Image (cartoon, rainbow, N blue to C red):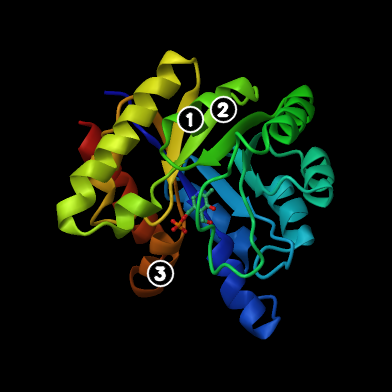
């Protein structure tokens, strides 16, 4: 089984910094520590309300990070123009609702088909690899292929929040979405709500290439430090793939 890559989402390091509008903790220094600990890529989400990552963080990350930089963005023109100038290699199209605490569901690609097609074509023209963050629904997988995305990122929140009795059914949904995506020529990533206790079955999904994990690594790092938090997550993913 190929090793699934770990991309660390650093948003919540910026959340702590923004709590005091200070310069520390610095998400860029933290991203470099993640890379030193073996992270395969760095992810951030520039939200409309700038609640965590700031525009300047994206510029500094681009200058500093040596693994692939993945920028999550909503489809709005403001975010698309920033993304086009960002120099990131990877882009993940996400829904954004100002009231939500975190990205609550996947993008409705069928409803936004023309806009997703337009945005992914513009980003791809700059050499970007574009994914759509979707719920594990077959219709959303098909729509992502129709819209010209190269990848999907499956929202694993329902799996992560599922009670023991429905968890297997949620994994089946993820598995079916992976199989369909692969048959349509799409690459498959996944993320949201994953931690050391629930990541293993997800890391074993067929055709999965990359996991995006943020909150659990940032919170674990408060206790054990960033180096151990990233290395431990990497080790659990490697173990799942061995
Ligand atoms: N993938 C996407 C598209 C996200 O929006 C998020 C949350 O910012 C994640 C992955 C990571 O989720 P978590 O912070 O729960 O690990």
Q: Residue at left 43%, top 52%?
A: 192
Q: Secondary structure at mark 3?
A: helix
Q: Which mark is first along the chain, 1 or 3?
A: 1
Instruction: Work out whether residue 102 or residue 30 is closer to the camera in this orientation and state it.
Output: 102
Nearer the observer, disc 3 or disc 1?
1
- Secondary structure type for disc 1: helix
Give the side of residue 200 with respect to residue 140, left or right.
Answer: left
For label 2, being within 8 Å of ligand 1 is answered no
Residue at image position (35%, 22%) is 179
**Nearest the camera: 48 or 176?**
176
Where does residue 57 sit, x and y in percent of width and height?
72, 59
Task: Give the CA distance from mark 3 to mark 2.
Answer: 35 Å
Residue sticking out furthest to the bottom: 20
C-alpha gap between disc 3 and disc 1: 34 Å
Question: What percent of the width, then of the height, locates residue 186?
Answer: 50, 21
Residue to which mark 3 is pinned: 219
The extreme left residue here reads 165
Report the residue marked by disc 1: 139
Marking on residue 143: 2
Q: Is residue 232 left or right of residue 112?
A: left
Residue ID at (73%, 53%):
58
Q: Is 113 placed left or right of 143 in the picture?
A: right
Give the label, 3 or 2, closer to the camera: 2
């Amino acid at each position: 089984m190929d090793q699934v890559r770990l991309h660390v989402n650093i948003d919540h390091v910026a959340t702590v910094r923004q709590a005091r509008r200070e310069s520390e903790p610095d998400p860029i220094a933290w991203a470099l520590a993640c890379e030193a600990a073996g992270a395969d890529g760095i992810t951030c989400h520039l939200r409309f309300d700038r609640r965590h990552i700031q525009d300047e963080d994206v510029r500094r990350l681009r200058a500093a990070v040596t693994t692939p930089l993945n920028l999550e963005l909503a489809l709005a023109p403001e975010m698309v123009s920033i993304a086009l100038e960002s120099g990131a290699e990877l882009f993940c199209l996400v829904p954004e609702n100002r009231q939500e605490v975190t990205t609550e569901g996947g993008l409705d690609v069928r409803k936004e088909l023309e806009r997703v097609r337009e945005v992914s074509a513009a980003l791809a023209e700059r050499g970007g690899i574009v994914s759509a963050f979707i719920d594990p629904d077959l219709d959303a997988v098909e729509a992502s292929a129709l819209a010209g995305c190269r990848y999907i990122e499956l929202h694993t929140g329902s799996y992560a929040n599922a009670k023991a009795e429905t968890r297997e059914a949620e994994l089946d949904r993820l598995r079916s979405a992976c199989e369909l995506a692969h048959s349509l020529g799409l690459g498959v990533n996944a993320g949201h709500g994953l931690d050391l206790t629930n990541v293993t079955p997800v890391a074993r999904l067929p055709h999965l290439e990359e996991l995006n994990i943020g909150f659990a690594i940032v919170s674990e790092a408060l206790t054990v430090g960033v180096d151990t938090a990233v290395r431990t997550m990497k080790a659990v993913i490697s173990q799942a793939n061995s």
